[in-house]
Amino acid sequence: MTSFDPTFLLLIGFFVLIYFLMIRPENKRRKAHEEMISSIEMGDEVVSSGGLLGKVTKISDQFFEISLGDNVKVKIQRTAISNVLPKGTISSI
């Protein structure tokens, strides 16, 4: 006759808890960020993870070109975009 070890059940419970508290929410955040990045179009106003606020002027495979002001343009990686702002935000600041 074999006896069931309760520590095995505790170990499985721990992995389930880790999945629901850490792995699943992170996957949801990553998926939402990827959808946000793929929906960016030229003319959208964005904020980079470094805090730069600008308007998208050019889109390539790996980079966005962001206009920060008069004659000031920078290229940033697609993953560096942290948020898309409503239109007109830059002019209201």
Image: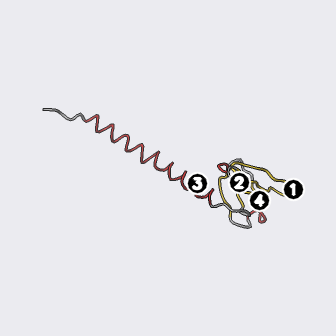
Residues 72 and 4: in front is 72
Distance in Å between CA atoms under marks 4 and 3: 20 Å
Q: Is residue 26 above or below residue 84?
A: above
Q: Is residue 30 left or right of residue 70?
A: left
Distance, label 3 to label 1, CA atoms, is 29 Å
The three-letter amino acid code for the residue at tag 1 is Asn
Q: Gap between marks 4 and 1, in whole Å?
A: 12 Å
The quadrant the C terminus occupies is bottom right
Say which residue appears at 79% left-offset and 50% top-offset. 74
**Which amino acid type is marked by label 4?**
Thr
Within the image, what quadrant is residue 12 found in? top left
Q: Amino acid at mark 2?
A: Ser
N-terminal label among 2 and 1:
2
Label drawn at residue 58: none
Residue 20: percent from left, percent from top: 42, 48
Q: Secondary structure at mark 1?
A: loop
Residue 14, quarter of the rendered image = top left
Relative placement, left or right, of 39 versus 16 is right
Does residue 12 lie above or below 36 as drawn? Answer: above
Q: Secondary structure at mark 2?
A: loop
Mark 2 — residue?
A: 60
Question: Is 52 above or below relative to 2?
Answer: below
Residue at screen point 79% across, 65% down: 91
Q: Which residue is mark 1?
A: 71
Q: Quadrant of residue 70?
A: bottom right
Q: Residues within 10 Å of mark 1 (few under 14, many from 20)?
A: few
Q: Give the amino acid at mark 3.
A: Glu
| Residue 65 in picture, x, y percent from top left | 76, 54
Image quarter in which the N terminus is found: top left
